[in-house]
Amino acid sequence: MITASMQEFFTQHPDIKYVFFGGKGGVGKTVMAGTAALWRAQQGRRTLLASTNPVHSLSSLLDQNVFGAPTPVNGVPNLFAYEIDTKDTIERSKVELTQKIQWFLKYADIKTRADEFVESATMNPAFEESAMFENMIDLMFEDKYDTYVFDTAPTANTRRLLGMSSVYGMWVNKMMQSREEAKSLRELLSYSRKKEKDPLMDYLVNLRMRMERAKHLLTDAEKTAFFFVTLPEALPIAVIKRFIDWFYEFGIPVGGVIVNMLIDKEGITADTPEFVRNRVAMQDHHMEDIWASFSDTRALVPLFETEVRGVEMLKRTAGQLFKD
Ligand SMILES: Nc1ncnc2c1ncn2[C@@H]1O[C@H](COP(=O)(O)OP(=O)(O)O)[C@@H](O)[C@H]1O
Ligand SMILES: [Mg+2]
């Protein structure tokens, strides 16, 4: 039984501004993100559907090139879509980081070249994720839209991405503490009381502020909702169970569960091929687990006869995802 549908959830949370979809690969996260964004736009809210993944799929979902800039979606007033150029962000972060490190090495009188530090820092896969996270919060802070729907990276990445705001916070605090100590020591040694300009410190203070602001928004249950998409199958269910636990741990608001690709049982008779009847029985079995495990199941979306592509198909999906 659905106790509160998708539509009821949004009615009860009228100020939702940031919407995310998580779940195993291939369960329909991109489709649901596109569908929710379309529905929000149809409600008259200026909506941005954004992808921060290095591997994009919005252009293919919408049958329209939306790479590199927020682009109005043809035929849907109020809807914009945007695949962010992650490579470009990473390059820019590298340049910025190099400048900071160069300044620091000079300040600390260390005769090492900055590029060695930068290489080791940026070779880390966390660097790419952090660039994606920065892209996301930049969009949020710009505040040009009423609703943001993010087509997020698969499971583990997403959690790390959001969990990172607390990790960042701790890291920056530690860095700032050592910077303050180094600075006062230096001031003491040079007997100079004059205040030096400190770009690294400015950067750290700014970073910490941004992270705190991001965390504040992402943990606000009136503004943020994270939905989990599953199929009535064992593996995708196991993935979102774990996922939901993590999110409660981080204090990130869970909007509920969406079950996708349910086979329509109407029209199933004894003449229906055994293959289909077997799959229906399997889905029935896993639906029992879903009802028992997720009291916040919001929608059951049927398996369509084709893939979901283009605005017309998204409208049809919205009719199911936001059924009264
Ligand atoms: N209800 C559905 N009926 C039919 N095809 C679907 C449905 N939901 C998703 N699909 C298709 O399944 C594939 C995977 O969906 P996608 O949204 O890309 O998954 P994810 O983003 O979770 O990896 C796509 O080809 C999509 O069109
Ligand atoms: Mg996807």
Image: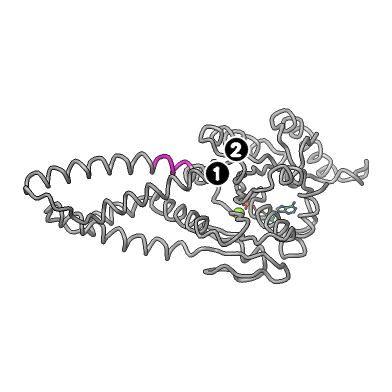
> Quadrant location of the N terminus?
top right
Residue 63 in the image: above or below residue 230: below
State the image coordinates of residue 142 (x, y, percent, origin top left): 51, 60
Under tag 2, what secondary structure?
A: helix
For the point 65% across and 48% down, the residue is 15
Q: Which amino acid is tagged 2?
A: Val
Classify residue 110 as left or right of residue 140. Answer: left
Q: Main secondary structure of the magenta part?
A: helix
- Badge 1 is on which residue? 155
- At a point 60% along the width and 46% down the height, the residue shown is 223
Q: What is the magenta range?
A: 163-167
Left/right of residue 299 with respect to residue 162 in the rendered view: right
Q: Amino acid at mark 1?
A: Thr
- Secondary-structure class at tag 1: helix
Q: Quadrant of residue 96?
A: bottom left
As for residue 164 lying within the magenta part, the answer is: yes
Question: In the image, residue 48 lies at what x, y percent?
Answer: 61, 61
Closer to the camera in the image, 232 or 44: 44
Tag 2 residue: 239
**69 versus 149 height, above or below:** below
Residue at point 9%, 50% (across, down): 192
State the image coordinates of residue 271 (x, y, percent, origin top left).
93, 44
Is 291 one of the magenta-colored residues? no
Q: Nearer the viewer, residue 96 or 302?
A: 96
The answer to whether marks 1 and 2 mark residues whose Cβ atoms lie closer than 8 Å is: yes
